[in-house]
Amino acid sequence: MEIDANKYYEYHVSQSTLSSTIESCWWIFDIIGTNYFSSAPNINNKRTIFNTLPGGEANKLTLYGIKALLTTGNIVDSFVLLRKFRDNIFLDLYLISKDRTAYEKKLESISKLSDIVDADSIDQLIKNLSSDDEDVQNWFQDKFINEQKKRIRRQIIGYSNFVKAIKGSNKSIEQLYSRFFDELLSIMDNRLENYVHSNGFTVISNEILSHPKERLCSIIKSIDRLITDLLIVYISTIILLNSTLLQSSDYVDALDMEERPINDSQYWIAPGISDFIKDNIKDINTDLFEYIKSCDNYSMKLDE
């Protein structure tokens, strides 16, 4: 079938699985973001650090931007947005890890201080964030002057710093990455860096040469794979940090309707996320699935 030259890229994108992958990601971010806002760790109804996951919200638009660029043949810029997608994912994982760590420290402090009995004292403990936590909050609120911004970006903010902090948050996550993700992320990083910085003629040529059908389909497929791999890292890490963020709404919905929840429904995984886990982790990498299941502190029903 002859394809209109103006529709060449759009046609091949539409024939790929990229659209369904993006749609799945959109719902995954929506579910996790909603659960984080409504039920992430808090003490006395006060959030420990952050109210939302900005990376996930931004990635909803970033994914559609990647697709739009591909449909016009703008290959290199689609990889630039893919790098942004990766950075946002690890920003959210960083925030989840900091929130959980802060929550655990506050609970530990409260349990040791027998004289804390009033809500104001508990609230004060929550406000006593570490210097890193305060720096991140100030960074979000753009309160730093130029020299401070440089220091924060070098020492705390940024993809490599986020990964380091996430891996250092507990031993289980450190082992998760060393066993399953370090090599994958290294390969991914090199590829994304090449596109961002235009290293080598083969990368630059993506903007100045036409794309035969086979090469274009290969590029679209590789982007689809990169997005899926990043979601595997994202969901696996969340399971070790706080798997309740993957929770189905059934339990809460029943309570809101003043009905008795179905037995154990608080452990159900949201349908779109459970499908992703089954199709991309459980059925593909049994060792990874068994590891994250064994490290889930909330006993969520990952295999149902």
Image (cartoon, rainbow, N blue to C red):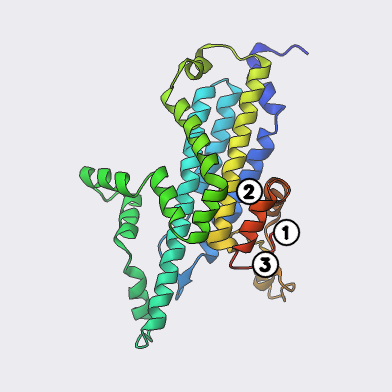
Q: Earlier in the sequence, mark 1 or mark 3?
A: 3
The residue nearer to you, when weighing 193 against 186, is 186
**Residue 119 rendering spot, x and y as whole percentages:** 39, 81
Q: Earlier in the sequence, mark 2 or mark 1?
A: 2
Question: How far is mark 1 from mark 3, CA to CA?
Answer: 11 Å
- Is 139 placed above or below 262 here? above
Q: How many marks?
A: 3
Q: Amino acid at mark 1?
A: Asp
- Identify residue for label 1: 303
| Quadrant holding the C terminus | bottom right
Q: Nearer the viewer, mark 2 or mark 1?
A: 1
- Identify residue for label 2: 27
Crowding at mark 1 (Cα within 10 Å: few <14, some 14-19, many 20+): some
Q: Amino acid at mark 2?
A: Trp
Question: How far is mark 3 from mark 2, CA to CA?
Answer: 19 Å
Checking the image for residue 267, the label placed there is 3
Q: Nearer the viewer, mark 1 or mark 3?
A: 1
Q: Residue at x 71, y 55 (%)?
A: 271
